[in-house]
Amino acid sequence: MNQPTRKNNKIKLPDGWRVVVARNFEEIETFRPTWEQMQCGESLPAPNVDIYRYLSVVESMKEAVQPHIMLLSYEGKPKVMVIGRIERRQITCRVGYFTVLKPSLRCLTILYGGILGRPSDEVCVILLQELINTLRHGEVDVTFFNHLLIDSHLIKTMTNFLCRDHFPTLDLHWQTHIPESVEAFYKMIPSKHKREWRRCERKLAEEGNGPVKVVCYRNEEEIDYIMEVACEISVLTYKDGMNIGIVDDSLTRALLRQAARDGWLRAYILYVNSVPCAFEFGVRYNATFFPEYMGYDPKWCSFGPGALLWVKVIEDLCVDATIDTLDYGFGDAAYKERLGTKSWPEASVYIFAPRLYPVFINILQSSTRSLSLGLECVLRRIGLIHWVKRCWRNLLQAKNPKSVP
């Protein structure tokens, strides 16, 4: 395949190739048949790339977000579609859980699962050059790829030294195969874990002076209630101190409404004596359940309400004939290793524009990231990584004035 050439600082595509970009709702609609067909062909279709969910997000954030959908075609045949949006994005420069700085840049965010068509290595070169062209023209300051497979050719062919992301965020992505029955699920679990879960449920019921139960909400008219419960719990947690808890805003409500209308919504709440103490909201997309929001009241933390709710959710999924996989999303955790049956590594990657300020932010982020990774490596070697993380989260929890002692 011919490589892209540059003329007058612009990318000249190889013969036969064409790129079209949709930047508004009308132009997106012309892509709809191709979009839906290409996503159906993906081995791991992601709900955020579904056209209905994408439009719900953009509509709810229309003052802050601009659609940006790229379609690469060869001799008139669609080959690759890139699902993204242009928005202001904070580049968090963090050491551990401590945030040093959060500069904001105009960012082209490529959604998770948003590169449709399974592009070959040669096509990835064309795609990457087109994205770099967008950066060079000043449309955006940075491009963000949300969790690519680490063997992706897009990672291997990143741009020049000053503009590339030197320390991509690496995460394990875990899934669990859902057995056909609750009995089959428990046969997979070691006896010590089953005893621990039963003990947690018994102690939780004793402390709460009442039964433990889980309710699953699926309807649009129930969204006001589940949002109220989730926000009351989330505001008490360490996630609130890091600004990563659930928020009652137009975007969250738009996503929940769209999920409920399309029959995707699964919102689980764990009650002790009719008092909510944990929640987990997610969506069923195709045959997979994707958890999206979760949290538990810290006053019950010694009884393991989060882990107990996970178990109850899996029990419910076992009797749901439409679901065969639980996708935990990004990041490693003990409960994912315990319950997961499959995992693979992914990397979140930035490409910065070749201009002074974006390059400076890249240097700043790379410096804090390298320090954080170095400290994490030392703590992991001496076996203190989980203890330090737990203590740090507890400290954030203690500093939260809304937290219940």
Image (cartoon, rainbow, N blue to C red):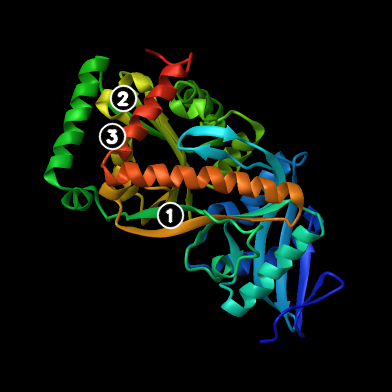
* Of pointers 1 and 3, the one earlier in the residue sequence: 1
Element carrying mark 2: helix
Q: Report the side of 169 relative to 268 (left or right).
A: right
In the image, which is nearer the foreground, mark 2 or mark 3? 2
Along the viewing direction, whichever of 193 and 52 lies nearer the viewer: 193
Residue 147 at x, y = what percent? 52, 56
Residue 159 position by quadrant = bottom right
Element carrying mark 3: helix
Element carrying mark 1: strand
Residue 163 appears anywhere in the view:
yes
Q: Report the side of 315 relative to 126 (left or right).
A: left
The image shows residue 356, relative to residue 200, as above or below, that is below
Q: Residues within 10 Å of mark 3 (few under 14, many from 20)?
A: some
Total marks placed:
3
Residue under numbered circle 3: 308
Q: Which mark is residue 178?
A: none
The image shows residue 345, relative to residue 4, as above or below, that is above
Specify the amino acid type for callout 1.
Thr
* Of pointers 2 and 3, the one earlier in the residue sequence: 2
Specify the amino acid type for callout 3.
Leu
Residue under numbered circle 1: 288
In the image, which is nearer the foreground, mark 1 or mark 3? 3
- Gap in angstroms between the C-alphas marked 2 and 1: 29 Å
Residue 146 appears anywhere in the view:
no
Along the viewing direction, whichever of 265 and 90 lies nearer the viewer: 90
Residue under numbered circle 2: 301
Q: Report the side of 127 relative to 117 (left or right).
A: right
Residue 231 at x, y = what percent? 51, 25
